[in-house]
């Protein structure tokens, strides 16, 4: 039984197409849905978790239809939204016990103890969550989500707002879960994290999936090396052979792909100078998923689908 | 049924560990009792505090119930509601858990107001009368907590909910029979007051002071509560974002 399968899954908000005919098939893997803010990641997750009705198309979770068999779907899954929603006036154990009760789990205390242990929270389990760090709160949410042993786990931006060490720990846990046979569907806009940990990723732009593959295969699409150039001015002619412009990351920073980076640096430098473009710096590095994204996406403005509320919440957490 | 109690337990734990909110909700009704009940020079009643106490008890429940809607607003803003809606347990248990909690909290506050009224010299009902008043207050609390929680389900943020609360609570209170009997009301106000659900509860409790059980007022209140709760359950069952 395929854990997640979508067929032309589509969502319109009025005239705005948030998710456009999504066709995905996800097996027992860590599957990353990547894209900038407003690209339709959360909308997709909300539909797959039965919280949002699709405008068109359908999806099946472990064989159950998300519209007609919503309750069966909910038995198979767990969902951790990007807002960190744990009760700070309750202890860690009480927070997990709440979900264990709602799931109607037999031998509850045992199950609660087990997931707290799994998430390295046993020692602090009986402290109020108010005293937990951000990383601990996120792990507590994972513990809540795991207490009924779901087949599919949906994580919406699981590492947002966490420091580097906490992020690494969350991803370690996610990988452990996958090795136990769980399917994990995760959204993120941190390309480097997806590159490290996802088995496959789908890149989403304005509601449309523009690529699905393993991170390594996607990186191979943009060539062996990336040359990043800080310049002033705009070249007029077409680029020299063996060098492709992927795009402009920000004004004045051009990103090129090539197969022999260090050899092409002098070529590119002389060519840019001959075009009357002042070169401030040139550097060679390996391609990242960011470069893949840049090559696939045309310049975009961040106007639509902007959730003002979530933005303010994020700012508040940072401050 | 078990789920309702689980949701109830969650809100109760959060409330009793909150401290300040336990006290702050009592300030308003207590102020009414003291500054209006004791101080207002009325001509239609010798003992105004006896007259106004049922009104203040119902005001306490009204305030508690409408305030209770903000619980769901916060669950929604902070992401709890999404997590609960993605659970296989029935969605109406979210609503029913809130109703049970908000009504229980309201009854606890009403008890404190009742004790305060006694201290201020109000003559108290018989034990059976008090028991029946609690029943009436409970039905009233169920009606308004279901209403406010369902409104909260459809509002997107706390400002919108605060606006709704302000728009509903004071007008409902002032157009009820809480502060004066129908006989002394201006003629335009008395029919409005008579049909105001807040008056159903106040009139029913006031009748108990004369040893009468007001069947029609209690009946109207129960009927309305059943109707509103049924509509609200339906809304919760079908909700998507």
Image (tube, coloured by chain):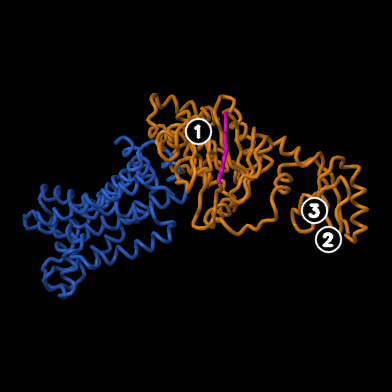
Chain colours: A orange, B blue
Q: Position of residue B163 (x, y in %)?
A: 38, 64
Q: Which mark is residue A234?
A: 2
| First of labels 1, 2 by sequence position | 1
Magenta segment boundaries in residue numbering:
A21-27
Secondary structure found at label 2: loop
* Marks 1/2: CA–CA distance: 53 Å
Q: What is the chain letter for disc 3? A: A
Relative horizontal placement of residue A123, taking residue B197 as reference (left or right)? right
Between residue A136 and residue A17, name the one nearer to us: A17
Same-subunit check for callouts 1 and 2:
yes
- Report which residue position mark 1 lands on: A143
* Marks 2/3: CA–CA distance: 10 Å
Same-subunit check for callouts 3 and 1:
yes
* Marks 3/1: CA–CA distance: 44 Å
Which residue occupies the extreme left position in the image? B211
In percent of the image, x 63 and y 57: which residue is there?
A302
In the rendered structure, does residue A25 fall within the stretch colored magenta?
A: yes
Viewer can see residue B122: yes
Secondary structure found at label 1: helix
Same-subunit check for callouts 2 and 3:
yes
Please rate how many residues cluster around mark 1, counting C-alpha atoms within 10 Å: few if below 14, some from 14 to 19, many from 20.
many
In the rendered structure, does residue A4 fall within the stretch colored magenta?
A: no
- Report which residue position mark 3 lands on: A254
Between residue A75 and residue B175, name the one nearer to us: A75
Q: What is the chain letter for disc 2? A: A
Q: Position of residue A232 (x, y in %)?
A: 84, 60
Relative horizontal placement of residue A238, taking residue B58 as reference (left or right)? right
Q: Which mark is residue A59?
A: none
In percent of the image, x 43 and y 32: which residue is there?
A75
| First of labels 3, 1 by sequence position | 1
Secondary structure found at label 3: strand
């Amino acid at each position: 039984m395929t854990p997640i399968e979508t067929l032309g899954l589509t969502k319109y908000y009025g005239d705005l197409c948030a998710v456009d005919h999504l066709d995905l098939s996800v097996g027992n893997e860590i599957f990353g849905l990547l894209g900038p803010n407003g690209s339709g990641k959360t909308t997709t997750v909300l539909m797959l978790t039965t919280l949002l009705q699709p405008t068109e198309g359908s999806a099946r979770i472990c064989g159950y239809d998300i519209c007609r068999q919503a309750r069966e779907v909910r038995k198979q899954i767990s969902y951790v939204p990007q807002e960190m929603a744990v009760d700070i006036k309750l202890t860690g154990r009480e927070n997990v016990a709440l979900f264990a009760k709602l799931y109607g789990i037999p031998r509850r205390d045992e199950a609660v103890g087990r997931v707290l242990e799994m998430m390295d929270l046993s020692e602090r389990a009986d402290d109020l969550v108010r005293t937990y760090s951000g990383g601990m709160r996120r792990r507590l949410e994972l513990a809540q989500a795991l207490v009924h042993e779901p087949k599919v786990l949906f994580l919406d931006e699981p590492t947002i707002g966490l420091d580097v060490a906490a992020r690494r720990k969350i991803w370690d846990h996610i990988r452990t879960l996958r090795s136990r046979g769980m399917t994990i569907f995760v959204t993120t806009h941190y390309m480097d994290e997806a590159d490290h940990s996802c088995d496959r990723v789908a890149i989403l732009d304005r509601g449309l999936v523009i690529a699905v593959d393993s991170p390594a295969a996607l990186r191979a699409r943009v060539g062996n090396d990336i040359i990043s150039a800080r310049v002033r001015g705009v070249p007029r002619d077409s680029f020299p052979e063996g060098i492709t412009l992927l795009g402009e990351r920000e004004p004045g920073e051009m990103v090129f792909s090539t197969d022999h980076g260090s050899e092409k640096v002098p070529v590119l430098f002389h060519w840019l100078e001959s075009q009357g473009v002042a070169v401030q710096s040139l550097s060679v590095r390996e391609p990242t998923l960011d470069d893949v994204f840049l090559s696939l996406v045309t310049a975009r403005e961040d106007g639509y689908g902007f959730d003002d509320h979530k933005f303010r919440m994020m700012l508040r957490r940072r401050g | 049924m078990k789920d309702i109690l689980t949701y109830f337990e969650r809100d109760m734990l959060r409330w009793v560990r909150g401290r300040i909110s336990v006290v702050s909700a009592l300030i308003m009704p207590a102020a009414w009792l003291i500054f209006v009940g004791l101080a207002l020079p009325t001509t239609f009643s010798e003992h105004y505090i006896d007259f106004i106490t049922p009104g203040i008890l119902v005001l306490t429940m009204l305030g508690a119930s409408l305030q209770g809607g903000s619980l769901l607003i916060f669950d929604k803003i902070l992401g709890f509601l999404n997590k609960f809606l993605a659970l296989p347990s029935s969605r109406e248990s979210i609503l029913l858990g809130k109703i049970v909690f908000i009504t229980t909290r309201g009854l606890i506050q009403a008890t404190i107001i009742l004790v305060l009224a006694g201290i201020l010299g109000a003559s108290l009902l018989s034990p059976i009368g008090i028991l029946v008043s609690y029943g009436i207050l409970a039905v009233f609390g169920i009606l308004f907590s279901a209403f406010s929680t369902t409104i909260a389900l459809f509002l997107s943020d706390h400002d919108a909910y605060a606006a709704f609360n302000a728009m509903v609570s004071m007008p409902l209170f002032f157009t009820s029979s809480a502060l004066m009997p129908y006989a002394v009301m201006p003629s335009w106000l008395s029919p409005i007051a008579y049909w105001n659900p807040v008056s159903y509860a106040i009139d029913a409790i006031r009748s108990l002071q004369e040893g009468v059980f007001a069947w029609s007022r209690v009946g109207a209140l129960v009927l309305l509560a059943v109707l509103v709760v049924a509509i609200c359950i339906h809304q919760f069952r079908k909700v998507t974002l």
